[in-house]
Image: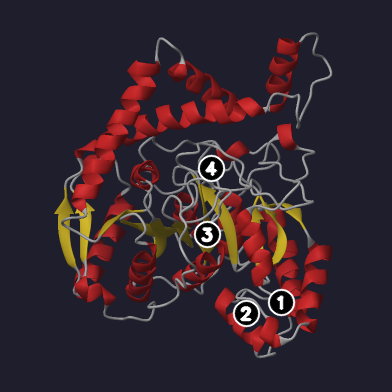
Amino acid sequence: MIRAKEIRTKICSQELKSVDVVKECFSCIKEVNPKVKAFLKLNETSALEQAEQVDKKEIKKYGLLEGVPITIKDNIMTKGQSMTSASKYLENYVSPYDATVIEKLKEAGAIFVGRTNMDEFAMGGSTETSAYQKTANPWNIECIPGGSSGGSAAAVSAGMVPFALGSDTGGSIRQPAGFCGVVGYKPSYGLISRYGACALASSFDQIGTFTKNVYDAALLTSVIAGKDYRDPVCQPNDWTDYTNGLNDIDVLKTLKIGVPKQLFDYRVDSEIKKYFNEAVNKLKMGNVQIVEVDIPAYKYVPALYKVIMCAEVSANIATFDGIRYGYRTSNGVSLNDQYAKSRGESLGYEVKKRILFGTYVLGAKNYHRCYHQAQKVRTLLIDQITQSYEKCDFIFTPATLQMPVKFGETLPEECDLFLIAANLAGLPGITVPCSFTANGMPMGVHFMGARFSDAKLFAVANAFEKIADFDIDKYPTI
């Protein structure tokens, strides 16, 4: 599958027909998906109908993504289609409206080929908690693709689609992007509307992108970003073309890149350490000034995330009561029994665990000791990160501290530490693949910028992509 920019260019020049692009897309899906299991639902008939309409259009009416196939994580609403969030609770739920990002993609002419697998209600980091299937890492089908947006990452990595949407609450785009060797981007909090996305933890959630290269991530963001009165935290920013300035080869020469002093206080995979140091040296060769930044509050990130995220999960999942929509037990004998059995029979272990813990930290006896204290320390972390940007332009770390594990194995709690910090602080982050390890698995690095520095973040990531020793046109053999 060629990249999104090239597809759109060739369709506009009539070198390619959109129908042929979509047929090739589904041909690849039918060959690869049975092994990878990235998709929960395919829209082959409607996608081909969309493509036929594109080929009949006048070129002057083409949108920015006219005729380009895309897939959507299964927690983002598309009117008239199922949205399960990979949970039995929403097994028969049909979206009554389009999410804002879907409206914008339709206006831009994108073609929706399907919906991708995920951890149930985005709770997990491996795509193993899905109620329906486990998605495999295309580079090694015995390993996890990461999560919670593992289906979207795997679909792009395996070449089934040129790009995909995911959601990122605690690294849920950037971690699987690192594991699967693709570009994963999480925007600044408030840059892209969350309207129509199933909420996990509202002060963390953001919709973001998976692509094979940084340019396509910037192109897709140009389409889906922007103001939306329906999302109260969405900023009223005018339309921005995030692809502008991506060809500035001198952007690295003006930069100071910060590497956290605390980076190697944690258990880091030896190959990740090796290739990250190589990436730092490549930046130095590009005349980047590397500085050390001191953010002691990083050590609190796993605990902060667990307490605040679970508290917000408890509040958001309270609407799933078996009364208004979704799964309803047939065995309830009273209202409370109806609630308990509907949730007990349809929700998975990970979801129940987070609801219970979140309810605990919000309880009257624990609120000030747990939740309120966590919010105070969150402010401390934000302050320390903000102060670090007085010394540097971007903070640079490995995407994850460990390589993907096999199914059934667990990752250490601090594996996504540097990704989660971006969610806690509402900052933009992007994972860019940088190397292949000795056993052929991809490894990524992560840039985190100040809030609303997204345009420059794309420019820096694009410049790094050009100097990194990673073949973005290489696809796994499955």
- From the image, tell me which residue sits under label 2: 7
- From the image, tell me which residue sits under label 1: 21
Q: Mark 2: which secondary structure?
A: helix
Percent coordinates x, y for residue 33 in the rendering: 69, 57
Label 2 to label 4: alpha-carbon separation: 31 Å
Q: Answer with mark 4 or mark 3, whichever residue precedes in sequence.
A: 4
Within 10 Å of the Cα at label 2, are there few (<14), some (14-19), or many (20+) other Cα atoms?
many
Label 1 to label 3: alpha-carbon separation: 20 Å
Q: On residue 209, which mark appears?
A: 3
Q: Mark 3: which secondary structure?
A: strand
Q: Answer with mark 3 or mark 2, whichever residue precedes in sequence.
A: 2
Type of amino acid at the residue the image marks with label 3: Thr
Percent coordinates x, y for residue 253 in the rendering: 21, 75
Q: Tell me the quarter of the picture where residue 113 sits.
A: bottom right
Q: Quadrant of the C terminus?
A: bottom right
Q: Mark 1: which secondary structure?
A: helix
Q: Nearer the viewer, residue 473 or 123?
A: 123
Label 4 to label 3: alpha-carbon separation: 18 Å
